Amino acid sequence: MSTISESELLAKVPSQLYINGQWVDAAGGKTVDVHDPATGLVIKSIADASPADGMKALDAAVAAQDAWAATAPRLRGEILRKAFDRVQELKDEFALLMTLEMGKPLSEAIGEVNYGSEFLRWFSEEAVRITGRYGTNPEGTGRTIVTQMPVGPCYLITPWNFPLAMATRKIAPALAAGCTVVVKPATLTPLTTLYFVKILEECGVPAGVVNVFTTSTTAEVSDPIVTDKRLRKLSFTGSTGVGQSLMKLATENMLRTSMELGGNAPFLVFEDADLDKAVDGVMIAKFRNIGQACTAANRVIVHESVADAFAQKVTERVKAMKIGRGTEDGVSIGPLIDSKAVAKADQLVQDAVSKGASVLTGGKAIDGAGTFYEPTVLTGVTSAADIMTEEIFGPVLSITTFSTEEEGIAIANDTEYGLIGYVYTEDFKRGQRLIEKLQTGMMGLNAGVISNASAPFGGVKMSGLGREGGFEGINEYLSTKYTMTPNPFA
């Protein structure tokens, strides 16, 4: 366990932009403050990039692209493996840093380091498994050669809620595939990415292959990059609205895009479910990361015959949760990311109550320093409540009921989103039916957390397109090229 102090750790984190292998100030020396959401205090000031800085980052990525694509896959993989080992060595430091800038409990931050670093190990292994094929065409007149090529310079935009995992989930497959990158972490939580890029530098990533900038004027800096003809790939994780705007820009040059957008996850509990297991599952699916996850259970849909018992068990667990700064022992609920998040959670709760819901516990913001909201359980939530259609992104568990399997499925699918769904049932055939009936890109069957570096993460409908992780993840950064050659025996 690291004994480094908060001040010592923050002093190790770069405060500049990383462009073409150099740590540099933003144009004009502008800076932006990063706050601890548990206290509201500034913990570090970092460079605030201008559009000119963003273009310098893209210039560097473009200049380095050909050499990096020509680098042996084994070498690319070994650099990623070194980064995995180094992040694991610094596990406690990365965890503390995430807790300081994002607010999640330290135990959960440790979990994110383990999860996030696995993308480095997984794609270090995938780098040497990029393949193609060779064969005779059906007519026998020639030979078909299919190869996989790096798509080219990529722009990666990561969200604030999982500062390490979202960076590694995008950077690792891009580097493994032979692509150079420009990374823009969220302004609210940029420190983890800056520290990670410092580690990549130490592990031998050549100048220009990875570039990172932070900015308080995202659209102003991002738009020229996205519309530059030299950029070939855009990967974004964030809200559906922003994703739609970016996709419109991406059409100007027909960019390859990966979009991991909003969610409205249903959590279905059937009458034959093991309620204790279902409660364990929903506690993870709802309250992990303080509910600030696109995979968080947004609508808990429980069969009417077990709804009261389920609500009672959940409420007992929620009442026992300790609230506080994530560095404190035993804390399971930290602060929300900012005051806007608190206001949104409270508005959704008050709206649900005004439309017939009952508050079993919680239901209000916590006065004092930091941006805390009580972990909340609502029951009797009706279809008219905004919480049934809007992503909560907070520690609010809303329960509604159903009477038949068909009705439960209909409620679960009654959303424009389709990222993930959770199903608890002891009926094997029902579980099989739900795999096919639930309109989501992912599903947890009697499992409350499913993210894994070896599995394809992504959704359908308005939850986006493309996949991150798994064998599919590296394909997002590769272009297929087909070559025909004459029959060599003719």
Image (cartoon, grey):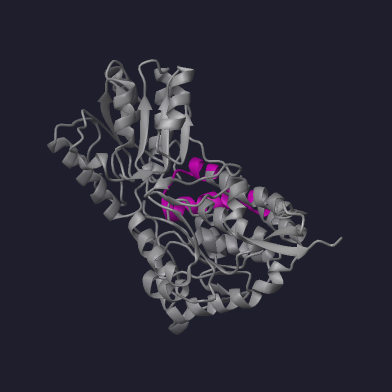
Of the 4 image quadrants, the one containing the C terminus is bottom right
Residue 332: tell me if it is visible: no
Q: Quadrant of residue 486?
A: bottom right
How far across and how far down the image is residue 85, in percent? 69, 51
How far across and how far down the image is residue 43, in percent? 43, 62
Question: For the point 43% across and 34% down, which residue is it?
Answer: 284
Relative placement, left or right, of 405 versus 349 is right
- Residue that sits furthest to the bottom in the current view: 28
Q: Main secondary structure of the magenta part?
A: helix
Relative placement, left or right, of 278 versus 174 is left
Q: Quadrant of residue 474?
A: bottom right
Question: Which residue is at the front of the view, 490 or 151?
Answer: 490
Question: Which residue is at the front of the view, 290 or 236?
Answer: 236
Question: For the point 27% across and 55% down, which residue is it?
Answer: 340
Residue 101 within the segment the image draws in magenta: yes
How far across and how far down the image is residue 177, in percent? 65, 59
Question: For the point 36% across and 51% down, which residue is it?
Answer: 38
Question: Which residue is at the front of the view, 483 or 333?
Answer: 483
Relative placement, left or right, of 328 versus 116 is left
How far across and how far down the image is residue 346, in percent? 22, 45
What are the residue bounds of the magenta stretch? 86-111
Instruction: Name above or below for residue 361 compared with residue 253.
Output: above
